[in-house]
């Protein structure tokens, strides 16, 4: 297939697609969309690799998301908008992820990072909670460095700590997925050489319009984060890769350029980052 668009962050490997995954994949292929399916723990990372090996136009990223880290400091229950599940908690086993990385379809380590949205209330527990996340994050950065792979970074309410953590790793390339930081934080990521990922959340957070206007087009990746963050144009539907067109159109409008320009440049950006 000849790709037209790269959805740089999708989760077709998640249970939300168990009932009709093949139909969604076919719609995605018919639309000329290539997907990078992103793992958030070992189970979903393994599924992403299996899908990438079985389907043309699919690649995989593997990693342990901060909300899935085994952490005794806080008991998590995800919001309904994020699936409504209770994370079971996973100990990071670098050897398992390195074994998965042997697949030629693995193009990144991610999504990994820091997330302080759900956190303990006491100062002592909060410090322990943050330190554990930082430790697991850096251990996975080390995997990426060893394997010469870029990062797909998840960061929520933790940008300063994440930026500080990455100062020692200037040679690693990355995308900050689902960016919700401020202008100064975006500029700090750009100074590190990172790409900025935008998805349907741009329709919910108005301040991101100015961020998009000021972010160079050659540093933007488009994504859906499906099954989450469905663009409002699709009502209450489960998100899927074909809805990425709404994100592209919005970026084109904000930058006063053509949809084709956004498609072409963001596709090239993804190819440059993920070496695909």
Image (tube, grey):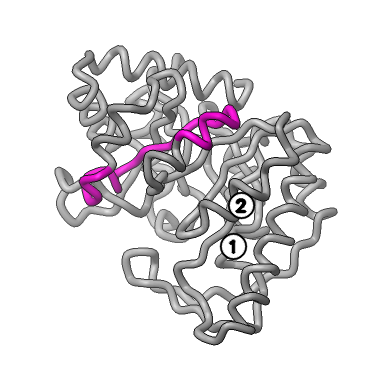
Which mark is drawn over residue 23? none
Residue at image location 34% in from the left, 26% down from the top: 30
Q: For this rendering, which residue is in front, 205 or 228?
A: 205
Q: Is residue 61 above or below residue 3?
A: below
- From the top left corner, tell me how far across and down residue 226 is, in percent: 38, 48
Q: For this rendering, which residue is in front, 172 or 22?
A: 172
Q: For this rendering, which residue is in front, 182 or 71?
A: 182
Which mark is drawn over residue 112? 2
Quadrant position of the C terminus in the picture:
top right
Tell me where residue 71 sits by quadrant.
bottom right
Q: What element carries label 2?
A: strand
Asked if the magenta segment contains residue 194, the reply would be yes
Asked whether the residues under the numbered discs 1 and 2 touch, taking CB atoms below 8 Å apart as contact, a structural biologist would say yes
- From the top left corner, tell me how far across and down residue 127 is, in percent: 64, 75
Residue 98 placement, left or right of 43: right
Residue located farthest toward the bottom when viewing the structure as drawn: 122
Residue located farthest toward the front when viewing the structure as drawn: 184
- From the top left corner, tell me how far across and down residue 114 is, in percent: 57, 58
Tell me where residue 126 sits by quadrant.
bottom right
Assess disc 1: are there few (<14), some (14-19) or many (≥20) residues with their C-alpha within 10 Å of its C-alpha.
many
Q: Name the residue under label 1.
A: 66
How many numbered markers are drawn?
2
Residue range highlighted in magenta: 187-207
Assess disc 2: are there few (<14), some (14-19) or many (≥20) residues with their C-alpha within 10 Å of its C-alpha.
many
Q: In this view, does 205 lie above or below 175?
A: below
Residue 5 placement, left or right of 237: right
Residue at image location 59% in from the left, 58% down from the top: 65
**Among numbered discs 1 and 2, the one appearing first in the sequence:** 1
Asked if the magenta segment contains residue 196, the reply would be yes
Q: What element carries label 1?
A: helix
């Amino acid at each position: 297939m000849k790709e037209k668009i790269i959805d740089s962050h999708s989760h077709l490997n998640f249970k939300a697609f168990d009932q009709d995954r093949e139909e969604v994949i076919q719609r995605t292929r018919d639309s000329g969309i290539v997907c990078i399916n992103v793992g958030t723990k070992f189970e979903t990372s393994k599924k992403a690799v299996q899908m990438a090996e079985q389907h043309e136009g699919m690649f995989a990223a593997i990693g342990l998301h901060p909300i899935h880290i085994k952490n005794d400091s806080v008991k998590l229950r995800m919001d309904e908008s994020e699936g409504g599940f209770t994370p079971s908690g996973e100990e990071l086993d670098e050897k398992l992820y390195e074994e998965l990385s042997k697949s030629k379809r693995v193009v990144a380590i991610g999504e990994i990072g820091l997330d302080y949205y759900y956190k303990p209330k006491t100062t002592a527990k909060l410090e322990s909670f943050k330190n554990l996340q930082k430790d697991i994050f850096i251990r996975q950065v080390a995997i990426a460095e060893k394997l010469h792979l870029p990062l797909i970074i998840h960061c929520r309410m933790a940008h300063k700590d994440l930026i500080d953590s990455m100062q020692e790793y200037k040679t690693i390339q990355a995308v900050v997925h689902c960016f919700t930081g401020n202008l100064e934080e975006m500029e700090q990521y750009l100074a590190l050489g990172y790409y900025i990922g935008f998805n349907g959340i741009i329709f919910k957070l108005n301040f991101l319009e100015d961020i998009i206007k000021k972010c160079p087009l050659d540093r933007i990746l488009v994504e859906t984060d499906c099954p989450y963050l469905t663009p409002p144009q699709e009502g209450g539907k489960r998100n899927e890769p074909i809805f990425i067109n709404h994100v592209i159109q919005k970026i084109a409008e904000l930058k006063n350029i053509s949809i084709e320009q956004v498609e072409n440049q963001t596709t090239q950006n993804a190819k440059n980052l993920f070496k695909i």
